[in-house]
Amino acid sequence: MNKSIIELKNIVKSFGKQNVLKNINLNVQQGQIVGLIGPSGSGKSTIIKIALGMEVADKGTAEIFEAKMPNRKLLSKIGYMAQTDALYMTLTGFENLKFYAKMKGIKSSELQLQIDHVAEVVDLKDALNKRVEGYSGGMMRRLSLGIALLGNPKLLILDEPTVGIDPALRRKIWRELKRIKNNGQSILITTHVMDEAEQVDEVALILDGNVIALDSPKNLKRQYDVPSIEDVFLKAEGAE
Amino acid sequence: MRIIAITNRVLKELMRDKRTLALMFLAPILILVLMSFIFNNSGTTNVKVGTVGISHELNQNLNTIKHVKIHQYDSEKTAKIALKAEKTDAIIEKDGNNFNITYANTDATKTATTKMAFKNAVTVNNIKQLKKHLEQSNRALNELQTKLALVTKKSVKTKSMPATQASPKIKNHYVYGDANTSFFDKILPILMGFFVFFFVFLVSGMALLKERTSGTLDRLLATPVKRSEIVFGYMLSYGIIAILQTIVIVLVTIGLLGVEVVGNIGSIIVINLLLALVALAFGILLSTFAHSEFQMMQFIPIVIVPQVFFAGIIPLDTMADWVQKISYIIPLKYAGDAVSNIIMRGARLSALGGDIGVLLIFLVILTILNIVGLKRYRKV
């Protein structure tokens, strides 16, 4: 079970004069959910971009599935969901799913099965033939998540997946994420919602381009001697 | 195939955007029809000329010239009042042996027409007088001959030319078109290319910009798709659109406007397809420098409008050398050149190697730049 899916070592990244990531070390094991938590602008999205190979680190190494990133072919094993919904508004939900499935290289024979499955998970079965421009914000978010789930990727990278989703569905999505994890798949997730941070296996607190804490929620709470992750976060930020 | 999937998606999006579709297919038709009205009617401006104290004959000659109407005035004063009130476009006044012509000159074509008309009238007048003199001398000659015949008592056949010899008739022959061929016919091939270039440039540039700002490009690049597959997918879809657009434009120009096409319509489509692909590559490239739709529009005056100037609508041979050299980097010039040759001289594609070659070079360079340029968004 101890296979490293994401391994970031001593990552440094600057955009112009702005030093966004100072020294990032992060590990995601197989069958693990790791949550990135930190204020906006702390560098969470940049970590994700480096893990995906969209950006290259100035220093340090980024490996996924024990292969060096950037690597285009590995992307077929990763399901990615960005902060923006990134949907084609004039196409229907079905057409969006089909297009991204083809881009991921899913075989035509599995296409319909995959689409049916993810539509079920994100609860969009009845809306698949409607154009996305007629969707509500929550529906778009769900469709976007559904696209990330296409093809049963071994690694899911989700950037704020539950923004704008109502509590009942949020719970459903978390149940699905746990099922995916129990399947042996790994998930890297960023979130603002602190009670979601309680659900992950490991929390990485990101502040000013550094990982200031990386441990299970339970250990972190004990270490900081506080009742919730939110307090851990506040205390860690204040202590810095 | 990912390229086909991207092509499918781009076309589907375009088909559902009815306004953009109408812009690409109806706007060129509307503009072409309007332009054909405007340019084809330019030859029929009517001018009214006021005359003061010129001979009856000259007046009559002027009046017989097409599109010229004569108003005779008794004095210079009344003529000038009429000119000021815009009742006439010019005054012709006899001053001793000379003529004074005053033009309102508010419309250059009217001034030119008047100038021409007066010159013609004077020439006709001179010829008539010459003829009269000739007739007189002929008559004198005849009389002399008959007298001579009487004296020598020999019948001499009068070889003299008939007094009223028919003046030579001028028959006009046109290599291309007919007497109605106008400026519009000359600029049409360039206009055709312009529409294809403009709309493909704008619509494709906007499409890629939207893909970037909405985050779909990032997400697309987070799949194992190749950067080249994205560029080729776009090329294929806009290539199809350009072919349809060219067919529509060609059918309108031939069917509705009655323009004669000497060469092969298929050749025209090939050239315009090539131009469209250049426009597409250009639009995609420039869209990466734009942060919003409005910034994309800002490329119109800097990129599109100069193309029109240098494409050959205005003859370049009279311009300064360095100005002419600019035209070498204008893709529209090569397409306009090639399509002009096809429409007016029936040139085959094999004879247009130079133009096609340059367009291909543009296309290859821009495409490579685009594929490499996408590295900005994904490093591999």
Image (cartoon, rainbow, N blue to C red):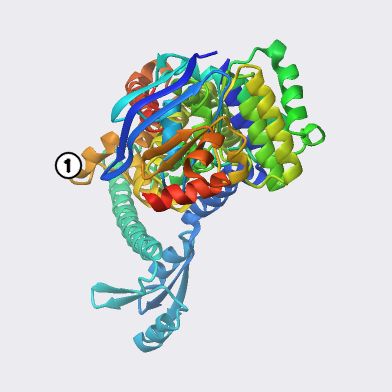
Q: What's under tag 1, amino acid-wise?
A: Asp
Residue B342 at x, y = what percent?
A: 45, 26
Q: Furthest-bottom residue in view?
A: B77
Which residue sits at x=43%, y=37%? A213
Q: Quadrant of the N terminus of chain B?
A: top right
Q: Is residue B148 left or right of residue B190?
A: left
**What quarter of the picture does the C terminus of chain B occupy?**
top left
Work out whether residue B91 can be spotted: yes
Q: To which residue does mark 1 refer?
A: B321
On what subunit does the disc labeled 1 rest? B
* Element under disc 1: helix
User: Which percent across, then down, holds residue B152?
Assistant: 26, 38
Task: Measuring from the top left, give residue A145's x and y in whole percent.
Answer: 64, 33
**Foreground residue among B105 and A102:** A102
| Residue at left offset 64%, top offset 41% | A162
Q: Residues within 10 Å of mark 1 (few under 14, many from 20)?
A: few
- Tell me the quarter of the picture where residue B52 sits: bottom left
Nearer to me, B93 or B9: B9
Residue B350 in the image: above or below residue B65: above
Left or right relative to B192: residue B307: left
- B178, B214: nearer the viewer: B214
Q: Is residue A226 above or below residue B123?
A: above
The number of numbered discs placed on residues in the rendered structure image is 1
Q: Residue furthest right?
A: A126
Tell me the residue at 54%/18% (across/down): A30
Measuring from the top left, give residue B278's x and y in whole percent: 41, 30
**In the visual, does A92 lie left or right of A156?**
right
**Residue B43 or B335: which is nearer the viewer?**
B335
Q: Is residue B292 visible?
A: no
Q: Quadrant of residue A208?
A: top left
